Amino acid sequence: VNEYDVGVFIIQHYDLYRLTNINETKNIGLLENQKEIVTLVEWPEKINNKINNKINNKIDLFFEYGPDMNKRFLSIKGLSNEKLNEIR
């Protein structure tokens, strides 16, 4: 977990790429929801929907590789401007 204090809220960044078992999410603080925290989750497909739906203020980062594995593409899914304004 990397944490960034940006003044008005805190960003907690979780890179789940190396997870091999869903139980590994229990001890990393992923479900510690607080109003002033925005949670960035890389590779959210590594955890199930039951856990995903319990995380508040979440932004998901999905990576895909190009055919030659030299390029990565990023898709971002998450908070609306309204929700971000609530956190601030």
Image (cartoon, rainbow, N blue to C red):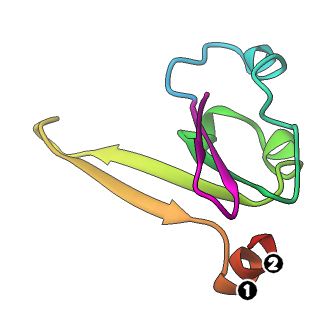
Q: Amino acid at mark 1?
A: Glu
Q: Amino acid at mark 2?
A: Glu
Residue 28 versus residue 74: which sits nearer the camera?
28
- Nearest to the eye among marks 2 and 1: give it: 2
Which disc, if any, is residue 86?
Answer: 2
Quadrant the C terminus occupies: bottom right
Examine the rendered structure and indicate whether residue 53 appears above or below residue 51: below
Quadrant the N terminus occupies: top right
Residue 88 versus residue 28: which sits nearer the camera?
88
**Number of residue marks:** 2
Q: CA distance from mark 2 to mark 1?
A: 6 Å
Examine the rendered structure and indicate whether residue 34 appears above or below residue 25: below
User: x, y percentage for residue 9?
Assistant: 70, 59
Q: Which residues are magenta?
A: 1-15
Whether tag 2 and tag 1 are in contact, CB under 8 A, the answer is yes
Give the crowd class for mark 1: few <14, some 14-19, many >=20 residues within 10 Å: few
Residue 4 within the magenta-colored segment of the rendering: yes
Examine the rendered structure and indicate whether residue 68 appears above or below residue 28: below
Q: Is residue 20 left or right of residue 82?
A: left
Residue at the image position 81 percent from the left and 78 percent from the top: 86
Which disc, if any, is residue 50?
Answer: none
Q: Secondary structure at mark 2?
A: helix
Residue at the image position 50 percent from the left and 51 percent from the top: 61
Identify the residue position indicated by label 1 in the image: 82
User: x, y percentage for residue 82?
Assistant: 73, 86
Q: Is residue 43 left or right of residue 10?
A: left
User: x, y percentage for residue 39?
Assistant: 68, 49
Q: List the single residue furthest toward the bottom.
A: 82
Q: Quadrant of residue 85?
A: bottom right
Residue 87 within the magenta-colored segment of the rendering: no
